[in-house]
Image (tube, rainbow, N blue to C red):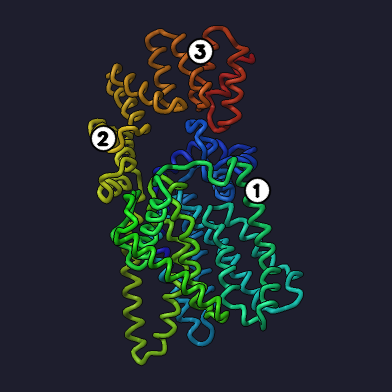
Amino acid sequence: MLATYGFTLGFGFVFDDHVQIERNPWLRSPDGLRLFLTRPFWGFNREQGPLGSNYYRPAFGAFDSLLAHIYGPDPTAFHAASVALHLAVCLLVAWGASRLIRGEDATAAALAAGLLFAVHPAHAEAVAWAGGQPDLLAAVFALIAVMAYLKAKDAGERFWILDFGFWIGPVAYLVACLAKETGVATVLVLVIVEATGWRREGSLGLAIRRATARLAPYGAVLALYLALRIHALGSFAPRNYGVTASMSGAVSYGAALLARYLGFLIVPFPAKVLAVVPVPSLHSFVALVGLSAAVAALAGLAVAAWKGSGRREIVLPLAFVFAFLLPVLRVDAIGGSNFAERYLYLPSVGFAWLAGLLASRLARSPVRRVLAVAGLIAIAGLGVAAAMRAASYRNDHALFAAAVRENPGSEIAHNNLGMALFAEGHLDAAEREYREAIRLLPGAVAPMANLGVLKERQGNLPEARKALEETLRRLPTHAIAAVHLARLSLRDGDRTGAARRLDALFAAGGESYDALTERAGIWLQEGRTDAAVPLLERAAREFPDRKEARELLVKVRR
């Protein structure tokens, strides 16, 4: 595992890392933990304005806050944390395999499952990108919760509820839910285990009573999580990204994604970076394959529940695969890049366990030595492939160049490649990418704003104003566009126009550090210290790592 991902410690921040880590004031705020717990994860980004958010991940926010407080915004520390989390998950996967496959073949199962999980190429995105940590955290705690639950279930003690070890499970489940939304599906895995193994309890009535008692703490945790989530977001999933336009479209899209994810789990090639999957018809081949897989899984579950004596070494891995894929099939609640390799991180735990089961059977073969050598060669090959895929995340240019190659029709990929080129000073190449992004999605906000900033850098102020004005027409809370237009007004000596521009931003619900300090500076030029101080105090409070507002406050108060 270290041979595959150790070199990622030299990587920088990419993509969302620049916003959610480098420019996230909550990470270093003394009030940060409360903010992550009571607001949407992206609530610090005021440029979104009144737009709703479906992301509630306070455990992820707390984890990154801890890293930021200890190491600052050092990418090496964040990447080291990702590698450490992945190592922990690999060990838990190996341990889980040894628990599922008992006897003399347990070692072979654990080794195969752990090694396959360590080098599966689909994990490169989650491990090599600091922004993939929610998947790693959710996996760690979901596995702890499941293993603790199975331990209590298998112990068969009457007073298991008094066992301290049992309560590790519900606590871990809460952290998994708070790390990423997919963690919620952990309880579905537990329900499947109970439903397919009830005969081991003796009778159906006794099995239901015992299962209810064991699951009750997890149900309470789920209720607590839902209450926290709804309080923070306003509803369970307030934002609809409109990827599909009807129920049949949502079903066909979900089915097609299921088929693609299952296929990618088995054959993780070619790489998928910022992939956007087109909406298929309900009668398309890929949608029919996905529907068939879903029907087969439900039919198998029904048969296993009817018999009540399902083999856990088969049921539990399949439950992991399908239960943890369910949350990512609802594309209208996700938006953006709706096919992501990191979404397979938790489902692939089940795939690794199935591989471990197969390895335990092959360990009895007369040609087991030959098979072992072949397996190690395959693991080495997958490790090389995972390392090559991880290398795409070393910097923004490498990541988005790969994204454009693999998804030439992605507006997000072209826009972000343009940003990387802009940062490197390649303005003409950046402009081509921005314009291509706008061509692909004419109503897109980000590439239009970036084009305006680029035109300002080139000195083409009329074109800059035109692009920035269009950005604010599309999204009145876009702080970058408002600040740049205000600065252009100040350059022309129009202080009133600059003030009006920033006031309109605040009225629309937008805000940023630069917007607050620019408006405060205008107030100070007008001799309005009373109006400037509250803005500077707000900037200093919400962006504690920035110095300008604090320095201005010191001067004003002298």
Check disc 1 and report the residue beneath it. Answer: 227
Of labels 1 and 3, earlier in sequence is 1
Check disc 2 and report the residue beneath it. Answer: 439
Tag 3: amino acid: Ile
Mark 1 secondary-structure assignment: helix
Check disc 3 and report the residue beneath it. Answer: 522
Q: Is residue 67 visible?
A: no
Q: Residues within 10 Å of mark 1 (few under 14, many from 20)?
A: few
527 displayed left or right of 333: right
Instruction: Give residue 478's position: percent from left, percent from top.
Output: 44, 27
Mark 3 secondary-structure assignment: helix
Q: Nearer the viewer, residue 327 or 491?
A: 327
Marks 1 and 3 in Cβ contact (< 8 Å): no
For the residues labelled 2 and 3, the Cα–Cα distance comes to 37 Å
Q: Is residue 522 above or below residue 444?
A: above
Q: Residues within 10 Å of mark 2 (few under 14, many from 20)?
A: few
For the residues labelled 1 and 3, the Cα–Cα distance comes to 43 Å
Mark 2 secondary-structure assignment: helix
